[in-house]
Amino acid sequence: MLSTIIPLFAIIALGYVAIRSGYVEADRIPVIGGFVVKIALPALIVNAVATRPLAETIYWPLVLGYAAASLLLMLTGTVAARLIFGTSVGQSAVIGLGMSGSNSGFMGYPIALSAMGPIAGTVLANCVIVENTVLIPVALLLIGITESRASGGTGAQALRKVALATARNPLILALVASLIVSGFALPLPAEALRAVEMLSNIAAPLALFVIGGTLASLPFKGVLGKIVLVTAGKLILHPLVVFAAMLAIGVRGDLLVTITIFAAVPMMSIYPLFGQRVDLAMMSASALMMSTILSFATLAVALWLLMPLVG
């Protein structure tokens, strides 16, 4: 299992050292990250979805099961944060998102690809649907409602902003376009497919490098209780809840293993941006760093437990 994840974490470490040492300027990381999010990952989704029959790409039981499990954990974490720490609705939603929103593109896909092969691209498309149309919009809506109340706005205004942000998401746009191509069996030029494949191949290593570079610029301190709750929820509870949900709806074999790997990775790398909006910047940044460091061990254990279920 270590032979699967060590090369991946080595690229994360390379990104960390490159930024920390000044070999690569820190302001390059947002640029590289933007390229991954706006170009490489959309190309990956096109390559995984548009080149296959629709029935082989979007597996709705997987989408619904993953959405139900992740949303349940997110809302549970939100309520727990309110009860334990007395945080606002917006702050509690950020804590809940940290427990349930995986870094599917930057970590889930590279690790699942290394462990499971091409099926990782298909599962990524399903995870993109859940994370970008369910989890992030719900969190943004709760944050927006809190902000609207503070500024005298309305919930409808917050909902409108969330809808616009979701519609403009490059991953969602790539997914919709790919589903149209796949659903209508539209032919794509061989040269275009080759270019898309080339971009897909660089998505994983660049994403891992960005993770390391991001960690190099994050402070590691904050409120310990919130960090522990978010980290434990993400690395332990999320994969367990997703695994149980998949078993309940009859998902088995490679799909079960792959979707659980996606659930077992740390929270999304943009998590601190959500924290900044509700005065939890230090907590969210620290939780991201802590979960990424600890995931080296938790992912090794998860892979060790899951690999006998392959096939």
Image: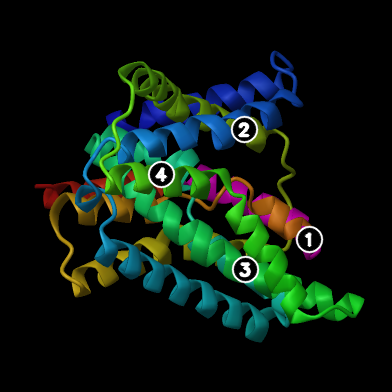
Give whichever of 110, 1 is nearer the camera. Answer: 110
Up the image or down, 146 lies above or below 112; here it is below
Earlier in the chain: of badge 1 and badge 2, it is 2
Task: Give how far across and how far down residue 221 sits, in percent.
Answer: 73, 52
Residue 108, disc:
4
Amino acid beneath label 1: Arg
> Which disc is residue 139 wearing?
3
Numbered circle sitting on residue 185? none
Label 3 and label 1: CA atoms lie apart by 11 Å
Q: Considering only order in the chain, which callout, 2 or 3, is on the residue closer to the N terminus?
A: 2
Quadrant of the frame with the N terminus = top left
Q: Separation of disc 4 and disc 3 at Cα? A: 21 Å
- Residue 103 in the image: x percent, y percent? 49, 48
Asked if residue 293 is among those painted magenta in the image, a careful observer would answer yes
Q: Nearer the viewer, residue 249 or 231?
A: 249
| x, y percent for residue 170 | 56, 43
* Residue under the image location 50 percent in, 30 percent down: 40
Give the Cα separation between the discs numbered 1 and 2: 20 Å
| Residue 110 visible in the picture | no
Question: Residue 169 at what x, y percent from top left?
Answer: 59, 49
Q: Which residue is mark 1?
A: 277
- Circles 3 and 2, Cβ within 8 Å, touching? The answer is no
State how far apart marks 2 and 4 are (Cα).
16 Å
Region of the chain picked out in magenta, as a range: 277-295
Residue that carries the numbered disc 2 in the rendered image: 33
